[in-house]
Amino acid sequence: MKNDSLLLLTLNRLTFLKPVERLFLAELCGSVGELVRLSRPGLEHILGRTLRVRDWSWGEVVKEAEQDQKHLTNRRINSIFYWDAAYPPQLREIYDPPIVLFYRGRLPDNTSPLVAVVGTRRPSGAARAAAYRMGYELAELGLGTVSGLALGIDAEAHRGTLDAGGLTVAVLGNGVDTLFPRANAGLGVRILRQGGLLVSEYPPGTEPRPYYFPARNRIISGLCRSTLVVQAPERSGALITADYALEQGRDLAVHAAGLNGIVGRGTLALRESGAALVREAADIPAGWGWQRRPGRTTRRSVSPPDPETAVCAADAGAALARRVELELAGKGKYYNGNFCIKQQRG
């Protein structure tokens, strides 16, 4: 049963099932043949609940699973199942782990802890800079980061980690053959080029849907030992990730740069509820007994810049020729995806 990938891919296609129900049925059924012999009443009896879904065609579901198998060989997409030795052990421990993960890139070393860095898509300038700096500094400590490839905090955490030569993992709310949002497609490609990972429980070809993202947040926190919410307003998706982290028994922290204003109300509420407050990456593993380790690569770009000593170029088109000259002269650099010119003091 555990080696029957078609059975597991078929169960993964039954979107009306809970993750724990898929695992239960995988243990119960020895093959796809046994699964498809189950009638709807029989399945409801086994699960102990009424299924609120229209009738489905077993033939169509199996056909979709077979197509998933083809994707795994034709599109350079890999998969890992719950019972595989390389399945992330931290994720296996949660209440509702995905039965299968589709991925592109390199699976992380399971002996090194990961840190989730999440937050709003519309952060303040201070929070944006903090997310980048946390990603960078975590990489310098030898710790990988996990986020969701979204605009704002997620993207800055990924970029900071990559700029320091570290490992970053993007958990998607769609198939790994699609990079969403499109504005971050280049960032997703860069993650792969620098030895990172794109991962999703959704089969290849799955388009992003609003209700997929809350579910994927349990994977973001589930992969990690700690979750850091840099900045989040009330009712933010990052707060869902925080809730999952607490349910999973993981460390939860908020960043000092993300507590102010309307956009920081959710972060402040977490702090008032007992979440740890951090100002730098070293604060996160302080209680682990973690020793500083070198990053995965020795190449790194400039150190995290201080926003107070740089002015971002406003017109990228007009400044394109000038950028090259300034960069070669050491008078400019890229910060948070923008080209910045150092201010002259004095």
Image (cartoon, grey):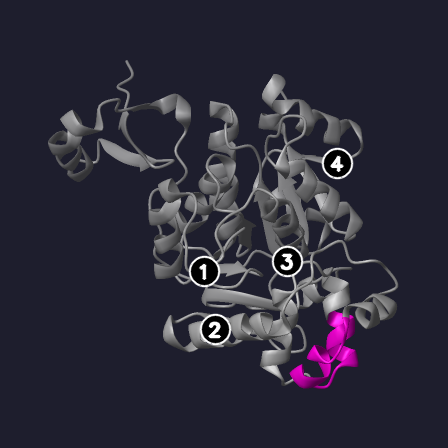
Q: Which-is-in-front pick, marks 3 and 1? A: 1
Crowd class of label 2 (few under 14; some 14 to 19; many from 20; radius 10 Å): some
Q: Quadrant of the N terminus?
A: bottom right
- Is 115 displayed left or right of 36 in the figure? left
In this figure, what is the number of numbered marks? 4
Give the labeled residue for mark 4.
275
Choose top left, top right, bottom left or bottom right for residue 3: bottom right
Q: Which-is-in-front pick, marks 3 and 4? A: 3
Q: Position of residue 342 (x, y in %)?
A: 28, 25
Q: What secondary structure is the stretch in magenta mostly built from?
A: helix
Q: Is residue 245 magenta?
A: no
Give the labeled residue for mark 1.
205
Looking at the picture, does residue 56 appear above or below residue 5? above
The residue positioned farthest toward the top in the image shown: 346
Amino acid identity at mark 3: Leu
Q: Is residue 33 magenta?
A: yes
